Each structure stands twice: as C-alpha cells, then as structure tokens.
Image (cartoon, coloured by chain):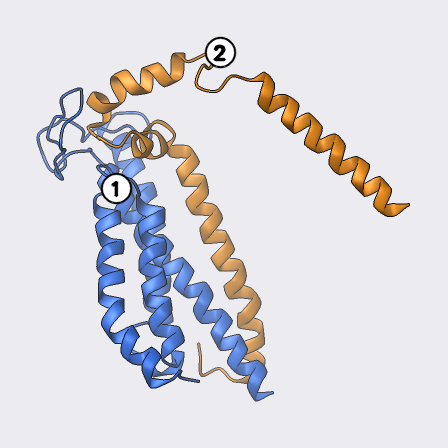
Amino acid sequence: MRMSKIVRTATDILYPFIIIFGFYIILHGHLTPGGGFQGGAVVATGTALVLVAYSWKELPGLVSKNLLWFQESGGLLLFIGAGLAAMIIGFPFFYNWLAGSGSIFGTPVAFGPNPGDLNTGGFLPIMNIAVGVEVWGGLVMVLLYLLSALEREERA
Amino acid sequence: MKQIIALITILVFAGSLLMIVTNFQFGVPIKSDMDDYFLKFGQVQTGTNNQCTSVTFDFRGFDTLGESTVLFTAVMGVALMFRRFIRGEDDADE
C-alpha cells in the first residue's frame, strides 16, 4: 500500500520542513499567530504525509501506537498538571504564576509593541507544548486507526 | 411543493441574517470593558505579545482544557471503535 516513487521522494524532502515548521508554531505560540492546536495539527500533517506515502506497517520505530498514546495522555496530563502546580504553590487553579517571576519563561514584558522574547509568557509556552504534543499524538492516532481498519477491509 | 417550502425557508433565513448584518455596526461594540481590559493589562499580566494566546490559554484556560478533553475523548472513541474490528481478525496490531 505504498505510493509511487515520486510521492515518496517528495515526502522525504518535504516532511522535515513541515515538522520543523509545526514545532516553530508551537514554540512561538505566545509571540506569533498560532499556538498549540495549530502547530500540533501541522506536525500531525507532516507525520500523516509519511504515513500515507509509505505503508503504515513499514514504520514500526518512528510511529508506534504506544508512543502516540503516551503523547496523547502525557500532553493532557502536563496541561492539567501545569494548572494544578499553581494550586500547590498557593494560587488559584490555572493562575499564571511564572509570568514575570524572572525564572524560566519569566522575563517581564513591557506594555506596547515590542519584538518579543522567547523566554516570556509564564506557563503559556508550557501549555502550548502540552497541547501541541497532545494534538499531534491524537490526530496521528486517528489516522493510524483508520488506516489499519482500511487494511482490514481490503483483506476481507 | 417541497422546493417552494425550501426556497421560502432559505429566503426567510437569508433575509433575517442580512437584516442582522446591516443593522449592526461592526467595529463599534456596545460593551467593550472586557476587550479593553485584555488589551490594556493582558500583555503585562501574562507576559505574552500574542493576545489571542493569552486569552485562550490564560484568561480562559478552562475553555482550552475542555477543548483538549474533547479531542482526547474523540481519539478514544475512534480507538475503541476500530479496536473491536481489529481484535476480531488478529491481535498483532495491539
């Protein structure tokens, strides 16, 4: 069930750039348009391109269901955990206690237009990464299950 | 007969939508206290230059939590549905 050599060669050239672009959107979610959902969808698209161009059975190490399940649940747990961490310290649920604190992601931001710094945003970048990883795992997971069902349909 | 009813329904809905669009003046909201607050304090309070992200992930973090849960539930539903198919044939995939 693999596609032609043209498609596979184009996929080999394109998919690193698509995935890197997706990670860029995830990591710069608090500075540029985009965020966790959009970037995760882009990374999932890059992975889906590989899955469709090659057969989904030929990629045992790169994309496995256990790893995707781990991504899916780990992303959601990291998201909730980031919200609960504020409660442990003594703030309300989902309080952005990292913003402006001076530690990681804690550089204060001045009011008004400025070019922006990657090391800002409190726990918004952490949440962006969590949601991005979750969306990535979830969408590839759906595609993997649908492809395996398609395989079964062809065999029957 | 059916087509005439459908046409009338479409015309009524399109007319009401157009009425709403023409009666409202865009760019001049009636109440803008919330927007002004986000624009004025959002950048300093959340440390983000992108105000859309500061609203979706910080001020309305619960909404995003629900969204993530919806996605998780959707993936879980797909997995459960197709796992039954796969298990009937062979257990090699799981």
User: Which quarter of the figure is the C terminus of chain B placed in?
Assistant: bottom left
Chain B takes which shade in the image? orange
Amino acid found under the numbered disc labelled 2: Ile
User: Which quarter of the figure is the N terminus of chain B placed in?
Assistant: top right
The answer to which image quadrant residue B41 occupies is: top left
Compared with B75, B45 (above or below) is above
Rendered residue at 53%/62% (across/down): B78
The answer to which image quadrant residue B54 occupies is: top left
Label 1 belongs to which residue? Answer: A29
Q: Which chain is blue?
A: A
Query: Could you say which is closer to the camera, residue B28 or residue B83?
Result: B28
Mark yes or no: residue A74 visible.
no
Q: Position of residue A93 (x, y in %)?
A: 33, 29
The local crowd at label 1, few if under 14, some if 14 to 19, many if 20 or more residues have their Cα within 10 Å, is: many
Left/right of residue B51 with respect to residue B7 in the rendered view: left
Q: Position of residue A143 (x, y in %)?
A: 45, 67
Q: Secondary structure at mark 2?
A: loop
Rendered residue at 80%/42% (across/down): B6
Label 2 belongs to which residue? Answer: B30
Query: Could you say which is closer to the camera, residue A124 or residue B25?
Result: B25
Compared with A58, A98 (above or below) is above
Q: Is the residue under label 1 in contact with that under label 2 (CB below 8 Å)? A: no
Q: Say which of marks 2 and 1 sits in front.
A: 2
Left/right of residue A72 with respect to residue B81 in the rendered view: left
What number of labels is visible?
Answer: 2
